[in-house]
Image (spheres, rainbow, N blue to C red):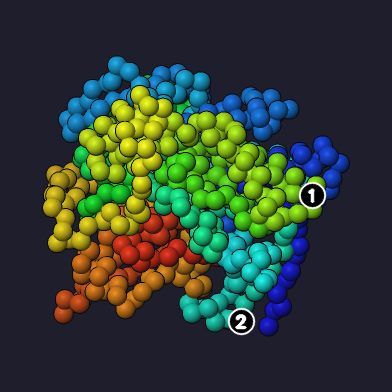
Amino acid sequence: MSTVDSVSTDILIIGGGPSGLATAIHVADLLKQKGLTRRVLLIEKGSAIGNHIISGAVIKADVFKELLPDVDPSEIPLDSKVSKDSTLLLSKNGSIKLPFHPPYMSNTGNYTASLGEVCRFLAKKAEEKGVEIYPGFSVSELLYENDKLIGAKTIDTGVDHHGNPEANFQPGTRIEAKLIIFAEGVRGSLAKKLIRKFDLQKERNPQVYSLGCKELWSVPEGNIQAGEIYHTMGYPLNLHEFGGGFVYGLSGNRVAVGLVVGLDYPDPTFDTHDAFQVWKTTPFVSKILKGGRLLEYGAKTLPEGGLYSLPKLYADHALIVGDSAGFLAMPALKGVHLAIKSGMLAAETALFAFEKNDFSEDTLKQYETLVNTSWIYKELYPVRNFRQGFAQGMIAGAFHFGGQLITGGAGFFGKLEAHKDSEATRKLSEFQGKKFKERFRDRLDFDKMLTFDKATDVYYTGVNHDEQQVPHLHINNPATYDAINIKEYGAPCQFYCSAEVYELHTDKSGHQELRIHAENCLHCKTCDIKEPGDGITWNVPNGGNGPEYKYM
Ligand code: SF4
C-alpha cells in the first residue's frame, strides 16, 4: 500500500478564487518588502485556476490598484467599463424602467468581467511572486494535534464507493502549516467544520444565502452593447421571494444573463433554474437573446447575511476570507472587491504573525481589527440589516429598508435577527400558496432555443466527476429522510438543485426513493444550505472534478 506523503509550508491557502489569490499575492509582496522568505502554498480543487469560478460579474475595480499597485490597469482582463446602467421592474408581458437606481445599486465606474479570467490572471501574478499553486487537489480534512489545528490533508483517491482502497489507491497528502487561510468560497466544507468546531458563529446571525443561475450567450450584433447592464426586479418572483435578474453586455457580442433568488423562500417545490428560464421568456430579456446561442451555464450560491452574519474570522492558526466568511455587499450583491480586500488584510495579519512567530488567536485577532477599521466595514455597516428586513417578504422589506435609509442602517428595530434558509422551507401540508409548477404551467415547456431544461444546461458546464470515489453528497440521516424530507416536504432537493442531481424515483408499488446523480454536481452548495433539517452534507469530491467553466 502507498504511504502517506507529507509536506510542510508556512502558509497554506485553501482555494484559488479572488480572496485566496489576493492573500497569496499580498503576502508574497509583504514578505519580500521585509526581506523574509516563507513558503506560501495554494491548493485549488478545480482542474485549473478559474474553472470553478462563476460570478455575474460587475466588479468595483479600484481594489486592483491596492492589490497590484505596480501593474498597468489595462493588463487586468476586465471586460468592459459600464456604459449604461438601468433597473427595470418586470411583469410577465412588459417592463418599466425605473427613473432612478435603488440605493447602493449604481454601477458608475464599474466593469463587467469574467471572474474566472480575472482569477487566471491573478494566479499568474502570484506565481511570478513565488507562490506555489497546485490546482486539481481537493483538501478534504483538517489535521489537529491536541485540538490545535496543524494542517490539512488532501483526499484519498483510488477508493470504492465505501472508501475501501482499490488497486490504484493513493492516500492524500498531509500538509502541515503554521497558518491556514480558508478561501474555499461560499459554504466552504472545511470552513464550515472549523466554524462549528470552534463555535465561531456564536452570538452572530446565521449566514443566509441566495442561489444564482447564469448563462453566457453569444448574440447578434446590436442586441446589446458591451458595458450595457440591466438589473431586474419583479417577475417571475412573487412578494415572498427575494431576488432579481441581471443582464450584462460583454465584448464580442456576448451577454451574461442570470437570476438570483434568496434561499429563504417557503415553497418546497420552488426551482431557481426553472424560474430563470421563465424570466428569459419576458419580452425584455427574450429580445436581447433573440437569434443568439447558449455558450455556457453555471450556478453558485452567494452569502447575503452581511455584517451580522460574519463568523469570528480567526482561530488558532486559521483565518477565513472572502465568500467563505461571507463578505458580500447588499443590495448590490457585490463581493469580489471585498474578497480581495479581506485577502489582503489576512496577508497583513499573516506578516504580523510571522514577525511575532506566533499564530495563536491572540495574535490573529488582528485580522478582525483590520477588517473593522477598513473600508470593508464602512461599506457593510450601513446595510447591516438589509437582507434580514426582507425575510418576511418584499413589503415588510421595503418598510425596513426605508427605515434603515433614514437611520444610517439601524432601522426602526436595531439589529434584526436572521434564520437559517433550511428552516424557511414549508412542509407540503403547510404551504398555503400556489406551487411553482402551477404558477408557471404555461412557461415550463422549454424550447431548447431560448429556454433549456436542466439536463441540457448541465451539458454546457463541462461538469465531470470520477466514478471511482466515495459519493461526495451525503444524506445525513437516512433513517428519517424518507419519512420527513420525502413524505412531508416532497424532496425539495429535486427542485432547488441547479443541476438535476437529485431524482425522486417512484417504483411500481408506489415506494419512493431518492437517487443521487452526483456526477452532475456544480458545487453550488445549495443542498448543504437549503435541505430541511440540514439533511444533506456536501463534501469535496476528487481533485479536478466538477464544472469546467471557461468565461464565467
Ligand atoms: Fe448544487 Fe447540491 Fe445540486 Fe451539487 S448537488 S449542484 S451542490 S444543489
Q: Quadrant of residue 474?
A: bottom left
Q: Give the numbered dot on residue 217.
A: none
Q: Earlier in the sequence, mark 2 or mark 1?
A: 2
According to the image, label 1 marks what residue?
A: 356
Left or right of residue 195: residue 415:
left
Residue 300 at x, y percent in the picture? 43, 48
Q: Quadrant of residue 28?
A: top right
Left or right of residue 276: residue 143:
right
Residue 143 at x, y percent in the picture? 64, 68
Furthest residue toward top: 99
The residue type indicated by label 1 comes to: Lys
Q: Is residue 100 above or below residue 211?
A: above
The answer to whether marks 2 and 1 mark residues whose Cβ atoms lie closer than 8 Å is no
- Secondary structure of the residue carrying tag 1 is helix
Residue 507 at x, y percent in the picture? 20, 76
The local crowd at label 2, few if under 14, some if 14 to 19, many if 20 or more residues have their Cα within 10 Å, is few
Q: Give the numbered dot on residue 167.
A: 2
Q: Is residue 472 above or below residue 280?
A: below
- The label nearer to you, 2 versus 1, is 1
Q: Quadrant of residue 29?
A: top right
Q: Is mark 1 within 8 Å of ligand 1?
A: no
Furthest residue toward front: 413
